[in-house]
Image: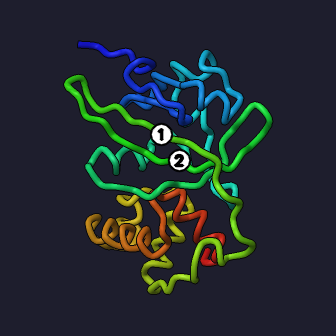
Amino acid sequence: MAIDPNEAFASSAALMVFDESLRVLCWNEGAEKLTGVPAGEAVGKACWEVIAGRDDAGGIVCHPGCSRARIVREGRCLPAEHLHARTSAGRRRISLETIAAKGEEGTLFLHVMKDAPEPKEGLESIGPRPQLTPRQREILGLLAEGQPAKVVAARLGLMETTVRNHIRLLFIALGAHSQLEAVARARAYDLI
C-alpha cells in the first residue's frame, strides 16, 4: 500500500521526507517557510542537492553517500546536526534531526529542520583539540586526500578492518559522522 508523504507526515515543523534513494518525497510548508524553496523545486530531487549542506568550516556535509541516513537506517540515534543549508536568500544555519521510519516498501527518512544558533567563535564551538596517535594522523592525511579505506590499507600495509577501526576511532575523537566531516573538523583543528 503506497502512502502519500504529504498527508502521512503533516506537521507544522519544517519537514523533508525522502526515501532510500535519497529522493525527496515531501517538502512541507514549514520547509518552504524556513528555506524559501518551494515544494515544486524540492520534491523529486536528491535531498543532498536540495539542502546542499555545509559545515561551519565550509566543508560538504550533504552528499550522495549520506552517512546520516545509513547510520539512522542501522537503528542508531544521532544528535541533531547543525549545518548551513541552501535557501532562496543564500545560506542559512539550521539544525537538522534525522528520523528513520521502516515500512513494508522500505525505509523513509525524515529531516526535521529548524533554525540553529550561530556557532561560538573559534575552536571552542567544536570542543577541545583531540589527541590522535601517529597512525591516526597518518590515516587522516590519506582520508583528506580522498583515499578509501581499501587504498589506505594497501598503502600502509594494514588489514582493511584495522584501517576501518582506526577510521571509526577518528570519527569518535573528532565528533564526526562521515569522512568529509572528519576531514573538515581536522582542518578546523589544524591537524592536517
Helix, strand or loop under label 1: strand
Q: In this view, does 86 lie to the left or right of 126?
A: right
* Residue 125 placement: quadrant: bottom right
Residue 51 in the image: x percent, y percent?
60, 37
Q: Is residue 65 above or below residue 150?
A: above
Within 10 Å of disc 2 (Cα), the crowding (few <14, some 14-19, many 20+) is: many
How many neighbours does mark 1 have within 10 angstroms: few (below 14), some (14-19), or many (20 or more)?
many
Q: Residue at 58%, 71% (x, y): give it.
A: 186
- Amino acid, disc 1: His
The residue singled out by tag 2 in the image is 96
Q: Which amino acid does label 2 sit on?
A: Leu
Residue 18 coordinates in the image, percent (x, y): 43, 29
**Residues tagged 2 and 1 counted as in contact (Cβ below 8 A):** yes
Question: Label 1, on which residue?
Answer: 111
Quadrant housing the C terminus: bottom right
User: Is the image coloured rainbow, by chain, by secondary structure, or in one colour?
Assistant: rainbow
Secondary structure of residue under mark 2: strand
Instruction: Work out how far the residue at label 2 is from the one at label 1, CA to CA, in angstroms.
Output: 6 Å
- Provide residue 147's location: percent of width, then percent of height: 48, 58
Q: Position of residue 133 (x, y in %)?
A: 44, 86
Q: Which residue: 30% across, 44% down?
A: 73
Q: Residue at x 59, y 68 (%)?
A: 185
Total numbered circles: 2
